[in-house]
Amino acid sequence: MIRKYKPSDFEDVIRIANRAWREIRRYSRQTLGDRISDIIHSGIEDDMLKGLEVKTQIEASPDNIRICEENDRVIGFITFRMNQDSRIGEIMNNAADPEAGIKGIGQQMYAHVLDLFIASGMKVAKVMTGLDEAHSPARRAYERAGFDHSLEFITYYKELK
């Protein structure tokens, strides 16, 4: 079942976010090194970064998060935004609890939010993800959800001494 966010969901959402991005954060630190990673993330523990980002989104727009639950247990979440001027709906952070053991949670959440976009008059749906190996499951999931146009970007870093 997919439903609107309730404040009582907060701890579960943050826990799922931090757990789901653990490998991505590990890959990022390995690729960038400790010094650059520590500077970019201002001393915040890698395992807490995504939770803090999601917390900020929840505080800014609590109406723009949906919860996937099974047997009264939060097993996934998805945040989004809609720009009424440009008519672009954007899927933001989303994750399924890796320990839920249920397939298709992401696809259910994407379909739900895409339906919200259509009902709200959006003309384009957008989602951004990394091109690295750690993000390959996300890319495959978005392609399965029908995202079929893309632009590629790269972010470069240089340590200044």
Image: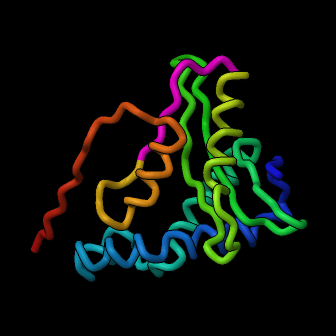
Query: Residue 155: x percent and y percent?
Result: 23, 53
Q: Quadrant of the C terminus?
A: bottom left
Q: Is residue 32 above or below residue 4?
A: below
Residue most extreme to the right: 72
Q: Quadrant of residue 82?
A: top right
Q: Quadrant of residue 76?
A: bottom right
Q: Nearer the viewer, residue 13 or 119?
A: 119
Q: Is residue 121 magenta?
A: yes
Q: Nearer the viewer, residue 34 or 160?
A: 34
Query: Residue 157: x percent and y percent?
Result: 18, 61
Which residue does the image show at 51% across and 18% down from the upper left? 86
Which residue does the image show at 42% across and 45% down from the upper left? 128
Q: Quadrant of residue 145?
A: top right
Magenta residues span 120-128
Which residue does the image show at 61% across and 56% down from the upper left? 56
Residue most extreme to the left: 161
Q: How many marks?
A: 0
Q: How is the image coloured?
A: rainbow
Query: Residue 12: x percent and y percent?
Result: 74, 71
Q: Is residue 158 magenta?
A: no
For this view, does 52 lie left or right of residue 63?
left
Q: Nearer the viewer, residue 116 or 102?
A: 102
Query: Residue 133: x percent and y percent?
Result: 31, 65
Report if residue 54 is visible in the image. Answer: yes
Report if residue 55 is visible in the image. Answer: no
Which residue does the image show at 47% across and 81% down from the upper left? 45
For this view, does 26 lie left or right of residue 160?
right
Q: Is residue 73 above or below residue 112?
A: below
